Image (cartoon, helix red, strand yellow):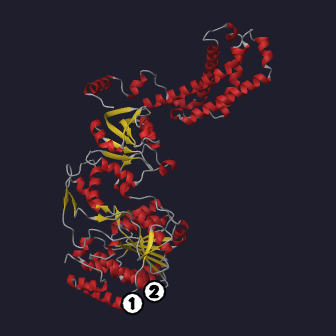
Amino acid sequence: MLYNDDKIRMVEIQAQTAPKGRDRIETVFPALPPAILLRFRKPLIILAHTFVFAAALMLSFLVIHNMQFKKAWLIDLYPTLILFFLAVKLTVFGLFKQYQGWWRYVGISDLLGIARASLTSTLMIVAVWFALGYTNFARNYLPIGMEEPAEGVCMADLFITIMLLAGMRMICRLYYEASQTVETGRLKRFLIVGAGNAGESLIREIHRMREVQYEIIGLIDDDPAKQGTHIHGIPVIGTVEQLPLICSEQKIDEIAIAMPSATRKQLRRVIQVCEGTKIRFRTVPSITDIASGKLRVSQIRDVDINDLLGREEVQLELDSIEAFAKGKVILVTGAGGSIGSEMCRQLCHFKPKLLLLVEQAENPLFYIERELQKDFPCVRVEPLICDITDKTHIEMIFNKYRPEVVIHAAAHKHVPLMEINPSQAIKNNVFGTMMVADASEKFGTVNFVMISTDKAVNPTSIMGSSKRIAEMYIQDLSRTSKTNFVTVRFGNVLGSEGSVVPIFKKQIAEGGPVTVTHPEMKRYFMTIPEASKLVLQAATMGKGGEIFVLEMGEPVKIVDLARELITLSGFSPEEDIEIRFTNPRQGEKLFEELSIEGEDMQRTRHPKISIWKNMPIDRDKLRAGINELLTIADSENSKHIIQKIKSLVPEYSNNCR
C-alpha cells in the first residue's frame, strides 16, 4: 500500500501528540505492583477464574432468556447452581493446570487448554446433573416451562466460559506487550521475504519486542495464492522479482529473509535482484536452531557471504570419525591457522586423549589454546611453538608425545608472496612436510593426513607446485611405511586469513575501490567447517597413498562475489563502491581445476569425496630431485628453483616469468 504526503504528515502529527509506550497504557490501566502480583499470583488467578465462572453462568441464563432478569432463575435457581458449577469447574481447571500459566505469553496452546478444561467440566456437570435426577429436580424446583431452557444453559456456559477466559488472557498479554513498548526515534521500514511460518513468527515476535525498532511494510512471496493476503495485519505485496520497485517506492531500510530452509541459490537470487538498492539484508536462524530452542525467530542477523556460498550440512560417518580420533594423541601442525584451528575444534568434539597444537606464530597459538580450553575443558591441550623445518625440535616432540594421528595443515599458502619468495615456499611446504612425515614414520604414528590444495593440479605457481611435490613425497613414503599416509585436496575456504573475502570487506569499509584481477576469474569456495569435516571423513577412508579430492560445488566468479559483498554492505556496486580490474598476478590462474568426476577420479562411499588416480614415481629419482631442489632453495636463486621444479613436476607452467 502506498501513502501520500498528506497521510504521512497526519500520521506524524498524531504520533507526536499521542502518549507514548507505557504512558499511553497507564492512562487506561493503573500501575500494578509487580511484587504483590507475583507473590499472590496463583490465588489471584483462582479468584479471577471464580469470577469468570460466575459471570459465565449468569450470562448463560441471560442468553437463554433473551437478556431478561427473571426471579424464577435469578433468585430460585442461580444461587443453587453456581455452587455446583464452581465446585466442578474449579476442580477440573486445577487438574488441567490452568492456574499455572504465564498469561503474558499466552498462545494457541493455552487457548486449547481452556477449551479442553471447559468441555470436560461441562460434560461432568451434565453427567452429574442427570445422574442425580434432573427430572425430579426440575419438577420440584423449576417453574413450569423452564425445564427446556435450563438444558441450554450448560451449552451457553461452555462457549461463554471459553470466550471470557481467552479474552481475559489476551488482554493481559496485550497490556504487557504494549506497556513494555518504548518507541525510540524513526522506525526502520522493514520488508519480510517469505510469507510462511518463519515470516509469521517474525512478525509476531517483532510486535512483542520491548523496543519498537521496525515498521513492517509488507511481506514478499513468490506463491501466487498468497498475493493480497494479510498475516497479522501485514499484507503480502509482491514477489521477489518486484523487490527493486517495492524497495524504491516504499523506501525500505532493511529486508529480512525469513526462509530458514532456503537454498544458497535462493538466497543469492534475493541479493542479486536487490543489487543497487542500498538496503541492509537480515536473515532468521536456521530451522535446526529454532527447533532446538537455541535461537528465536526474532534473533535475526545480517546475511553473510557464507550464507550465499556455503552449502547444505555435511553428512558424516560419525562412528568412523570417533574411532579415528577418540582417546588418541593427535598432533595438528599449523594449529593457529584458519584450517588448522578449525581442525582442532572439530577434533575436540570427539574427545581425543591429548591434542598437540604445533604452530610457529605465537599469537594465533595463544588464542586457539584459550578458545579450546574454554569451549572444551575436558580435552587436554598442549600448545607447542615449533618451526616444522626444525628437524631436531620436531623429533623431540614426536619422541616425547608419540602422536597416533597427525593432521599436517602447516603451509605457506599465499600465491603472490610465494612467487616473490620461492625458497621459503620450498623450505616450508616441501622440506617442512618431509620433516613431519619422516618423524611420523620414525615414531610410529598410525595415521598421517596432509592438507593440500587445488592449486597443486596442473600448477602455475610456486605455491601450487611446492604442494604437488609434497604430495608426491607423501604418496611415495606410503608405499613402504607402516604409517597410513593420505592427502586431501580442496579449493579456497571462505574467510581464511589472506583470502579474497576479508580483503574485499576491508576495501569496502575503506570506501573502495574493490580490486578484482580479471572479469572472468573464477574460484571454488568452501566454508572452513565443511572443509575440516570432510578432511576428517576422508582420513577415515584412507588405506595409504590416496590423494582425496573434496567436491567443491560450482565455481564462483570473483567479480560476482565482489558485487554481492558490496550489496550486503548496503552499497550500490559501481555507484557507491567502484570495482576496479587489475591484471592477474604471478602464478594465478583464471580457472582452478578441481573436479571429482572424470577418468582419473575414483568415487568413494561418500558423495563429496573422490580419489585421484595417478601413476607412482620412481623413488630414487624423486628423492634425488627433491634433495637437489632443497640445495638450490638455500641459494635463493629463483630461476634455478623454477627450473628444478619443472623437472620434478612436468605439468608445472609459469607464464609470468
Left or right, residue 585 beside residue 77: left
Where is residue 488, by image quadrant? bottom left
Tell me the residue that label 1 is attached to.
Answer: 619
Q: Is residue 18 left or right of residue 126?
A: left
Residue 252 appears in the rendering: no
Q: Residue at x 27, y 25 (%)?
A: 9
Q: Nearer the viewer, residue 211 or 572?
A: 572
Q: Earlier in the sequence, mark 2 or mark 1?
A: 2
Quadrant of the image containing the C terminus: bottom left
Q: Is residue 332 visible?
A: yes
**Left or right of 630 on screen, residue 351:** right
> Helix, strand or loop at disc 2?
loop
How many marks the image carries: the answer is 2
Please give the residue where the numbered disc 2 appears in the rendered image.
479
Instruction: Give the alpha-carbon distance from disc 2 to disc 1, as whole Å.
Output: 10 Å
Percent x, y of residue 270: 34, 48
Identify whether 228 is placed above or below 295.
Answer: above
Crowd class of label 1 (few under 14; some 14 to 19; many from 20; radius 10 Å): some
Above or below for 498 versus 544: above
Give the residue at x 25% y 27%: 5
Whether label 2 touches label 1, CB < 8 Å: yes
For this orientation, the residue located farthest to the top is 71
Looking at the picture, which amino acid does disc 2 mark? Arg
Residue 610 lies in quadrant: bottom left
Numbered label attached to residue 157: none
Front-most of residues 377 and 467? 467
